[in-house]
Amino acid sequence: MPRFDIGPIAFWVSPTTIMKSAIALANWQARGSQEMLQEYRQFRNDFFPFLLSQPHDQPLDEFCMVAVEAIKQTIHRYNVSDPTVLAFASTLTETLESPENHTAAIDYTRQYTDWMQQFQASPAGDIARRAAKQLVSWGVQPLYEAVAGAGSLGNQVYGQYAPAMRAICVQMKVVCQDTHADICFIETLLHEQIHAAIFHQMGDDAERRELGWLHELAALLTSQAAIRTAVQELPDPHQVTRVVRILNDLRTRQDFGDLADAVLKDTSHPLVAWLAWKQVFQLSPDQQRNYATCEIITPILHRYGWNVHFPYHYGDYFVSCFVDSL
Protein backbone atom coordinates (compact mmCIF):
# COMPACT_ATOMS: atom_id res chain seq x y z
CA MET A 1 0.00 0.00 0.00
CA PRO A 2 1.72 3.23 -1.11
CA ARG A 3 -0.37 5.56 1.10
CA PHE A 4 0.03 6.11 4.84
CA ASP A 5 -2.47 8.32 6.66
CA ILE A 6 -0.89 10.47 9.35
CA GLY A 7 -3.98 12.03 10.84
CA PRO A 8 -5.27 14.38 8.12
CA ILE A 9 -2.06 14.07 6.06
CA ALA A 10 -1.66 11.47 3.32
CA PHE A 11 1.95 10.33 2.88
CA TRP A 12 2.78 8.48 -0.33
CA VAL A 13 5.64 6.04 -0.80
CA SER A 14 5.93 4.60 -4.28
CA PRO A 15 8.50 4.17 -7.06
CA THR A 16 6.68 6.93 -8.94
CA THR A 17 6.99 9.47 -6.10
CA ILE A 18 10.69 8.63 -5.82
CA MET A 19 11.26 9.10 -9.55
CA LYS A 20 8.99 12.13 -9.78
CA SER A 21 10.73 14.03 -7.00
CA ALA A 22 14.18 13.00 -8.21
CA ILE A 23 13.54 14.62 -11.59
CA ALA A 24 11.27 17.58 -10.95
CA LEU A 25 12.81 18.79 -7.66
CA ALA A 26 16.44 18.45 -8.67
CA ASN A 27 18.45 21.67 -8.75
CA TRP A 28 18.52 22.02 -12.54
CA GLN A 29 20.26 25.18 -13.73
CA ALA A 30 20.80 26.67 -17.17
CA ARG A 31 23.19 29.33 -18.46
CA GLY A 32 23.36 30.69 -21.96
CA SER A 33 21.89 33.14 -24.40
CA GLN A 34 18.48 34.77 -23.94
CA GLU A 35 17.10 32.63 -26.76
CA MET A 36 18.33 29.43 -25.13
CA LEU A 37 16.98 30.44 -21.71
CA GLN A 38 13.60 31.24 -23.24
CA GLU A 39 13.38 27.78 -24.83
CA TYR A 40 14.56 26.21 -21.56
CA ARG A 41 11.88 28.02 -19.52
CA GLN A 42 9.17 27.09 -22.03
CA PHE A 43 10.20 23.46 -21.86
CA ARG A 44 10.40 23.38 -18.05
CA ASN A 45 7.18 25.31 -17.51
CA ASP A 46 5.29 22.91 -19.76
CA PHE A 47 6.85 19.57 -18.86
CA PHE A 48 7.43 19.68 -15.10
CA PRO A 49 3.86 20.64 -14.07
CA PHE A 50 2.61 17.78 -16.24
CA LEU A 51 5.12 15.39 -14.68
CA LEU A 52 4.18 16.41 -11.15
CA SER A 53 0.46 16.09 -11.83
CA GLN A 54 0.70 12.35 -12.49
CA PRO A 55 -0.89 10.12 -9.82
CA HIS A 56 1.40 9.12 -6.96
CA ASP A 57 0.30 5.48 -7.22
CA GLN A 58 0.74 5.24 -10.98
CA PRO A 59 2.82 2.17 -11.96
CA LEU A 60 6.42 3.20 -12.55
CA ASP A 61 6.68 1.81 -16.09
CA GLU A 62 3.50 3.62 -17.11
CA PHE A 63 4.64 6.86 -15.44
CA CYS A 64 7.99 6.81 -17.25
CA MET A 65 6.42 5.95 -20.61
CA VAL A 66 3.92 8.82 -20.29
CA ALA A 67 6.67 11.22 -19.19
CA VAL A 68 8.96 10.35 -22.09
CA GLU A 69 6.11 10.88 -24.53
CA ALA A 70 5.38 14.25 -22.88
CA ILE A 71 9.00 15.28 -23.43
CA LYS A 72 8.65 14.54 -27.17
CA GLN A 73 5.37 16.43 -27.36
CA THR A 74 6.80 19.44 -25.52
CA ILE A 75 9.77 19.60 -27.88
CA HIS A 76 7.42 19.46 -30.85
CA ARG A 77 4.90 21.94 -29.39
CA TYR A 78 7.50 24.66 -28.86
CA ASN A 79 9.72 23.70 -31.80
CA VAL A 80 12.67 23.34 -29.44
CA SER A 81 15.91 23.50 -31.41
CA ASP A 82 18.59 24.77 -29.03
CA PRO A 83 21.23 22.04 -28.57
CA THR A 84 21.51 22.68 -24.82
CA VAL A 85 17.78 22.35 -24.24
CA LEU A 86 17.63 19.24 -26.41
CA ALA A 87 20.51 17.76 -24.42
CA PHE A 88 18.59 18.52 -21.21
CA ALA A 89 15.53 16.75 -22.62
CA SER A 90 17.74 13.82 -23.58
CA THR A 91 19.13 13.64 -20.02
CA LEU A 92 15.60 13.54 -18.61
CA THR A 93 14.64 10.78 -21.04
CA GLU A 94 17.70 8.72 -20.11
CA THR A 95 16.90 9.19 -16.43
CA LEU A 96 13.33 8.00 -16.92
CA GLU A 97 14.31 5.01 -19.05
CA SER A 98 17.32 3.88 -17.01
CA PRO A 99 16.86 0.32 -15.64
CA GLU A 100 19.24 1.21 -12.81
CA ASN A 101 17.01 4.12 -11.79
CA HIS A 102 13.92 1.91 -11.92
CA THR A 103 15.61 -0.65 -9.69
CA ALA A 104 16.76 2.06 -7.26
CA ALA A 105 13.25 3.57 -7.05
CA ILE A 106 11.75 0.16 -6.30
CA ASP A 107 14.42 -0.59 -3.68
CA TYR A 108 13.93 2.78 -2.00
CA THR A 109 10.18 2.20 -1.96
CA ARG A 110 10.57 -1.17 -0.30
CA GLN A 111 12.96 0.28 2.29
CA TYR A 112 10.80 3.32 3.12
CA THR A 113 7.58 1.32 3.13
CA ASP A 114 9.05 -0.97 5.77
CA TRP A 115 10.23 2.05 7.75
CA MET A 116 6.81 3.72 7.57
CA GLN A 117 4.99 0.57 8.66
CA GLN A 118 7.19 0.37 11.75
CA PHE A 119 6.81 4.11 12.33
CA GLN A 120 3.01 4.00 12.13
CA ALA A 121 2.88 1.20 14.71
CA SER A 122 5.25 2.96 17.12
CA PRO A 123 4.59 5.66 19.74
CA ALA A 124 6.07 8.17 17.28
CA GLY A 125 3.30 7.36 14.81
CA ASP A 126 0.74 8.28 17.46
CA ILE A 127 2.60 11.51 18.19
CA ALA A 128 2.60 12.37 14.49
CA ARG A 129 -1.14 11.82 14.12
CA ARG A 130 -1.92 13.92 17.20
CA ALA A 131 0.48 16.68 16.13
CA ALA A 132 -0.99 16.89 12.62
CA LYS A 133 -4.48 17.30 14.10
CA GLN A 134 -3.07 19.97 16.41
CA LEU A 135 -1.93 22.00 13.41
CA VAL A 136 -5.47 21.92 12.06
CA SER A 137 -6.83 23.21 15.38
CA TRP A 138 -4.44 26.17 15.10
CA GLY A 139 -5.71 27.05 11.64
CA VAL A 140 -2.89 25.60 9.55
CA GLN A 141 -4.90 24.94 6.41
CA PRO A 142 -4.87 23.27 4.03
CA LEU A 143 -2.67 20.33 4.95
CA TYR A 144 -1.08 19.00 1.79
CA GLU A 145 -0.26 15.48 0.71
CA ALA A 146 3.33 14.44 1.21
CA VAL A 147 5.55 12.16 -0.85
CA ALA A 148 8.72 10.23 -0.18
CA GLY A 149 11.84 11.39 -1.98
CA ALA A 150 15.40 10.11 -1.95
CA GLY A 151 18.25 12.54 -2.62
CA SER A 152 16.83 15.02 -5.11
CA LEU A 153 17.13 18.06 -2.80
CA GLY A 154 20.70 17.38 -1.70
CA ASN A 155 22.17 15.45 1.19
CA GLN A 156 21.54 18.13 3.84
CA VAL A 157 17.88 18.97 3.10
CA TYR A 158 15.23 17.05 5.02
CA GLY A 159 12.21 18.25 3.07
CA GLN A 160 10.64 20.92 0.92
CA TYR A 161 7.22 22.15 -0.12
CA ALA A 162 6.88 21.84 -3.89
CA PRO A 163 4.20 24.28 -5.13
CA ALA A 164 4.11 22.73 -8.59
CA MET A 165 3.41 19.33 -7.03
CA ARG A 166 1.06 20.79 -4.40
CA ALA A 167 2.75 18.41 -1.99
CA ILE A 168 5.47 18.13 0.62
CA CYS A 169 8.54 16.14 -0.36
CA VAL A 170 10.21 14.43 2.59
CA GLN A 171 13.70 13.21 1.75
CA MET A 172 13.56 9.84 3.43
CA LYS A 173 17.15 9.09 2.49
CA VAL A 174 18.26 12.03 4.66
CA VAL A 175 15.66 11.64 7.41
CA CYS A 176 16.34 7.94 7.95
CA GLN A 177 20.05 8.61 8.48
CA ASP A 178 19.32 10.95 11.38
CA THR A 179 20.03 9.64 14.88
CA HIS A 180 16.42 10.44 15.82
CA ALA A 181 14.77 9.60 12.52
CA ASP A 182 11.24 9.18 13.92
CA ILE A 183 10.99 12.65 15.47
CA CYS A 184 12.96 14.17 12.61
CA PHE A 185 10.38 12.78 10.17
CA ILE A 186 7.48 14.29 12.13
CA GLU A 187 9.11 17.69 12.44
CA THR A 188 10.06 17.78 8.75
CA LEU A 189 6.55 16.82 7.68
CA LEU A 190 4.90 19.48 9.87
CA HIS A 191 7.58 22.13 9.29
CA GLU A 192 6.99 22.04 5.55
CA GLN A 193 3.22 22.13 6.06
CA ILE A 194 3.64 25.57 7.67
CA HIS A 195 5.59 26.79 4.64
CA ALA A 196 2.88 25.36 2.38
CA ALA A 197 0.07 27.05 4.33
CA ILE A 198 1.83 30.43 4.13
CA PHE A 199 2.40 30.00 0.38
CA HIS A 200 -1.25 29.03 -0.09
CA GLN A 201 -2.43 32.22 1.61
CA MET A 202 0.16 34.65 0.21
CA GLY A 203 0.59 33.30 -3.30
CA ASP A 204 3.67 33.76 -5.45
CA ASP A 205 4.54 37.43 -5.96
CA ALA A 206 7.98 37.82 -7.49
CA GLU A 207 8.06 41.52 -6.60
CA ARG A 208 7.04 41.11 -2.96
CA ARG A 209 9.93 41.31 -0.52
CA GLU A 210 10.00 38.45 1.95
CA LEU A 211 11.19 38.04 5.52
CA GLY A 212 12.83 34.65 5.21
CA TRP A 213 13.50 34.58 8.94
CA LEU A 214 9.78 35.01 9.70
CA HIS A 215 8.90 32.11 7.38
CA GLU A 216 11.43 29.86 9.11
CA LEU A 217 10.54 31.07 12.60
CA ALA A 218 6.88 30.18 12.06
CA ALA A 219 7.68 26.78 10.54
CA LEU A 220 10.16 25.86 13.27
CA LEU A 221 8.26 27.06 16.33
CA THR A 222 4.81 25.94 15.20
CA SER A 223 5.82 22.44 14.11
CA GLN A 224 7.73 21.85 17.34
CA ALA A 225 4.87 23.27 19.43
CA ALA A 226 2.47 20.81 17.81
CA ILE A 227 4.78 17.90 18.62
CA ARG A 228 5.28 19.10 22.20
CA THR A 229 1.53 19.39 22.67
CA ALA A 230 0.97 15.92 21.24
CA VAL A 231 3.67 14.26 23.32
CA GLN A 232 2.26 15.66 26.58
CA GLU A 233 -0.68 13.27 26.10
CA LEU A 234 1.57 10.21 26.26
CA PRO A 235 1.37 8.16 29.46
CA ASP A 236 5.14 7.51 29.63
CA PRO A 237 7.01 10.49 31.16
CA HIS A 238 10.34 9.13 29.91
CA GLN A 239 9.02 9.29 26.35
CA VAL A 240 7.97 12.90 26.92
CA THR A 241 11.44 13.79 28.18
CA ARG A 242 13.08 12.03 25.24
CA VAL A 243 11.01 13.84 22.61
CA VAL A 244 11.50 17.28 24.18
CA ARG A 245 15.27 16.68 24.32
CA ILE A 246 15.31 15.63 20.66
CA LEU A 247 13.30 18.69 19.61
CA ASN A 248 15.77 20.95 21.38
CA ASP A 249 18.63 19.21 19.58
CA LEU A 250 16.93 19.46 16.19
CA ARG A 251 16.26 23.15 16.74
CA THR A 252 19.94 23.89 17.36
CA ARG A 253 20.79 22.30 13.99
CA GLN A 254 18.35 24.34 11.92
CA ASP A 255 18.56 27.70 10.22
CA PHE A 256 17.34 30.35 12.67
CA GLY A 257 17.32 27.86 15.52
CA ASP A 258 19.14 30.43 17.64
CA LEU A 259 16.50 32.99 16.72
CA ALA A 260 13.75 30.59 17.77
CA ASP A 261 15.46 30.12 21.15
CA ALA A 262 15.72 33.88 21.61
CA VAL A 263 12.06 34.45 20.74
CA LEU A 264 10.94 31.71 23.12
CA LYS A 265 13.03 33.34 25.84
CA ASP A 266 11.45 36.74 25.12
CA THR A 267 7.86 35.55 24.83
CA SER A 268 7.36 31.96 26.09
CA HIS A 269 4.84 31.87 23.22
CA PRO A 270 5.68 29.30 20.51
CA LEU A 271 2.79 30.40 18.26
CA VAL A 272 3.79 34.05 18.06
CA ALA A 273 5.15 33.82 14.49
CA TRP A 274 2.22 31.75 13.19
CA LEU A 275 -0.32 34.11 14.76
CA ALA A 276 1.51 37.01 13.13
CA TRP A 277 1.23 35.29 9.74
CA LYS A 278 -2.50 34.72 10.29
CA GLN A 279 -2.83 38.47 10.85
CA VAL A 280 -0.84 39.16 7.67
CA PHE A 281 -3.26 36.92 5.75
CA GLN A 282 -6.08 39.29 6.77
CA LEU A 283 -4.39 42.44 5.47
CA SER A 284 -5.43 44.25 2.31
CA PRO A 285 -3.55 43.25 -0.87
CA ASP A 286 -1.38 46.38 -0.74
CA GLN A 287 -0.52 45.83 2.94
CA GLN A 288 0.19 42.15 2.31
CA ARG A 289 2.61 43.11 -0.41
CA ASN A 290 4.40 45.35 2.10
CA TYR A 291 4.12 43.11 5.15
CA ALA A 292 7.93 42.96 5.35
CA THR A 293 8.19 46.63 6.34
CA CYS A 294 8.80 47.55 9.97
CA GLU A 295 5.70 49.77 9.87
CA ILE A 296 3.41 46.78 9.26
CA ILE A 297 5.06 43.73 10.82
CA THR A 298 6.33 45.30 14.07
CA PRO A 299 2.90 46.18 15.57
CA ILE A 300 1.58 42.77 14.51
CA LEU A 301 4.38 41.02 16.42
CA HIS A 302 3.79 43.33 19.39
CA ARG A 303 0.11 42.38 19.38
CA TYR A 304 1.02 38.74 19.97
CA GLY A 305 3.49 39.36 22.75
CA TRP A 306 6.86 39.83 21.06
CA ASN A 307 7.87 43.41 21.91
CA VAL A 308 10.57 43.44 19.29
CA HIS A 309 12.40 46.37 17.74
CA PHE A 310 14.44 46.08 14.57
CA PRO A 311 17.17 45.31 13.95
CA TYR A 312 16.72 42.51 16.50
CA HIS A 313 20.02 41.14 17.79
CA TYR A 314 20.45 37.65 19.20
CA GLY A 315 23.92 36.36 19.98
CA ASP A 316 26.24 37.24 17.10
CA TYR A 317 23.37 37.63 14.62
CA PHE A 318 20.47 39.92 13.88
CA VAL A 319 17.33 40.05 11.77
CA SER A 320 15.55 43.09 10.43
CA CYS A 321 12.82 44.23 8.06
CA PHE A 322 12.43 46.82 5.35
CA VAL A 323 11.91 50.54 5.93
CA ASP A 324 10.25 51.73 2.71
CA SER A 325 7.10 50.35 1.10
CA LEU A 326 7.05 49.19 -2.50
Image (cartoon, helix red, strand yellow):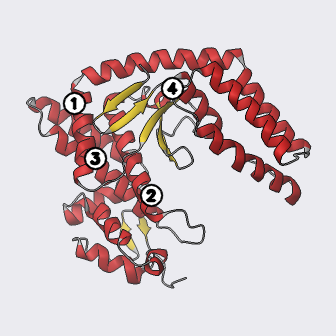
C-alpha separation, residue under disc 2 versus residue under disc 1 = 27 Å
**Residue 264 — which label?**
none
**Residue 57 — which label?**
4
Other residues around mark 2 within 10 Å, as few (<14) / some (14–19) / many (≥20): some
Q: Secondary structure at mark 4?
A: loop
Residue 140 x, y percent position in the rendering = 31, 54
Q: Residue at x 64, y 18 (%)?
A: 102
Q: Residue at x 59, y 72 (%)?
A: 207
Other residues around mark 1 within 10 Å, as few (<14) / some (14–19) / many (≥20): some
Q: Residue at x 46, y 77 (%)?
A: 285
Q: Are marks 2 and 1 in contact (CB under 8 Å)?
A: no
Q: Are marks 1 and 4 in contact (CB under 8 Å)?
A: no
Mark earlier in primary sequence (4, 2) = 4
Q: Is residue 269 above or below residue 86?
A: below
Q: Secondary structure at mark 3?
A: helix
Residue 87 x, y percent position in the rendering = 85, 37
Three-letter code for the amino acid on which mark 1 is drawn? Asp
Q: Quadrant of residue 81?
A: top right
Residue 108 x, y percent position in the rendering = 52, 19
C-alpha separation, residue under disc 3 versus residue under disc 2 = 21 Å
Mark earlier in primary sequence (2, 1) = 1
Mark earlier in primary sequence (3, 4) = 4
**In this rendering, the label closer to the viewer, 3 or 4:** 4
Three-letter code for the amino acid on which mark 2 is drawn? His
Three-letter code for the amino acid on which mark 4 is drawn? Asp
Left or right, residue 240 beside residue 227? left
Mark earlier in primary sequence (1, 4) = 4
Residue pointed to by mark 1: 126
Q: Is residue 121 above or below residue 164?
A: above
C-alpha separation, residue under disc 4 versus residue under disc 2 = 25 Å
